[in-house]
Amino acid sequence: MYNLTNTLMIEINNVSFGYTRKKLLYKKLQLTLTTGNIYGLLGKNGAGKSTLLKNIIGLLYPLEGTISVNGHAPARRAPSFLETIYLIPEEVHVPAVTIDRYIDLFAPFYPLFNREQLMAYLEKLEVATADKLSTLSFGQQKKFIIAFALACNTKVLLLDEPTNGLDIPSKKRFRQLIAAVMSEERMIFISTHQIKDLDNLIDQVIIVDEGQLLLNASISAISEKLSFKTVEQIPADRQVLYEEDALKGKAIVVENSGKEQTKINLEHLFNAITENPSLAKTIFNH
Amino acid sequence: MNDTFSVKRFGWLFKKTLLERPAQLMGLTALSFSLSLIIYAVVRMMSNFDDAQNFSFLVGLVGGGCFLASFVFGQFTSNASGSSFLTLPASVFEKWLCGVVITGILYLFLFLIFFRLMDMAFVGIYHNGLDPKAAFYQEQYNAVHLLAYDELVARSSFIMFFNFAGIMLVGSLYFNKAAFIKVALITCGICVGAFLLNLLIAKMFFSNMQTAFPYYMVWLMKGKERGRMELPEDSMKVVAIFFRYLIPAMLWFLAFMRLREKEF
């Protein structure tokens, strides 16, 4: 049984990855992730969000550089590593078995699996069936896998577009559940392009685009550095990272020079960072 | 924790592999056995017992074995099932061994038991149908016997089984979709290619050659007579060892290496 109190780190050192060497998705990516955080990985379609998750769990191997997950090299896919990490892919796989049979077949591989927790999570997500899991709708299957993954109590949980296929009430319950199970010993890494689904959930934002890491900052750091508001006139004395026509003027993202407290709009943040990467870098390194 | 092999973990994996897709696994096995039974019955009606036994044994063992071999690592048809398989906390060796045990041991022994029972039934029916008072009863009785698993046809079938099942195991790890068909086509292509290349080379050495089989023999014509030239005994032994042991061992080991390197 491994020790839950150890601080876990995912270290991505100078990782370059591409499906061909000519077209790299990541170029010398440098990233360190630690427990106690819910990371939101944001990127455009095809930016390599799923690819990064697959590199972290060892389904894909970097062309250059190294990845270390609490000292493990993911590419070896050792059982002692795999029992501490769980990937929920965008498309989930459930065999044609009942919930009890699924638990019987899959749970033994995860030493910290807790059946009572699973039942509670299933109840919370409103998944109940005595039939085979394959007869459930896609959304229900996904909720089952989310509940099972959480009940495995792995230190690292990787979620690839977890809210795809979930209805609006389920998205809300999903957010509540993730917030409830989060602890200092855990790390949750969520990749999505449905940015609004992560509102009030993540505490660390990672934005990748064109092979580069554009932002890796906590919500508090973003609040401190940037201001999100709607104005009638764009202020002339502020550096504007992003502007968009809104109902009552213009929604803008500007440098927060006056320690204003504004609510972060993740969609606007994403646009601001991807459209002005160099300015964003200057602001955040300031 | 032993990251290479644990009996307990292998037990869980084996159970999971058998019970996760029981309908497909048992269905495929039942289909192979049924095909073998039908072939036995049909060929028996159209020809003699030897042909029925040989053909049925070959198709059931080699054909069924290939089907199963392409199925045990068949999780890569979808992104979700492939990820689930590779990220399941069991070692690569255990996952590979599971495929090997199901295809190379479990199916083999189940088929041998099934075939023996089927053969006993057919041969028994034939023997019971004979009239003990008939003039050639003893000759007729002795003419039909159970297929011995150490006879030439059975031994050749075993060699083919381990070679082709090995090819299928490797192929299913290279091709994510329609692996069976793709591997079958490539294997046929390689066999035909090897035969034609060998024929071309043999033609350069023998002007009176009728046909030639790779690594084995050439048929030569002398006037209207036909004769065959085989490899010297020592060389034949080397070739036999190569096909019986080395190639299957390499193929089954290659499946392990491919599974270890598999990216998905």
Image (cartoon, coloured by chain):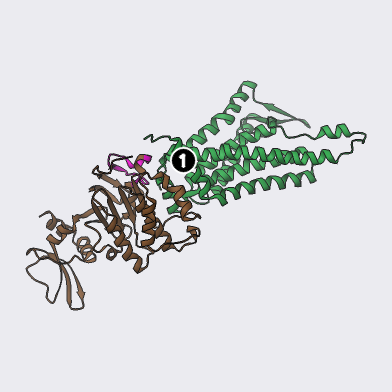
Chain colours: A brown, B green
Instruction: Report x, y in % for residue B207.
Output: 67, 31
On screen, residue A82 versus residue B142, left or right, reads: left
**Outermost residue toward the bottom in this view:** A248
Task: Name the one closer to the observer, B32 or A138.
Answer: A138
Q: Position of residue A272 (x, y in %)?
A: 19, 64
Q: Is residue B87 toward the left or the right of residue B36 in the image? A: left
Figure check: B251 above or below A220: above
The reply to whether the magenta stretch includes residue A65 is yes
Q: Amino acid at mark 1?
A: Lys
Stretch of the chain drawn in magenta: A57-79
Q: Nearer the viewer, residue A165 or A125?
A: A125
Quadrant of the image occupied by residue A7? top left
Mark 1 nearby-residue class (10 Å; few <14, some 14–19, many ≥20)? many
- Which residue is under mark 1? B95
Quadrant in the picture for the N terminus of chain B: top left
Left or right, residue A233 beside residue B6: left
For residue B125, above or below residue B178: above
What residue is rendered at 41% in x and 58% in y? A144
- The image position of residue A201, as x and y in percent, is 25, 60
- Res. A21 visible in picture: no
In percent of width and height, residue B260 lies at 42, 39
| Residue A71, magenta (yes or no) | yes
Residue B51, placed above or below residue A156: above
Q: Please indicate, yes or no, whether residue A194 appears anywhere in the rendered image.
A: yes
Q: Residue at x 53, y 38 (%)?
A: B101
| SS class, disc 1 | helix
Chain under disc 1: B
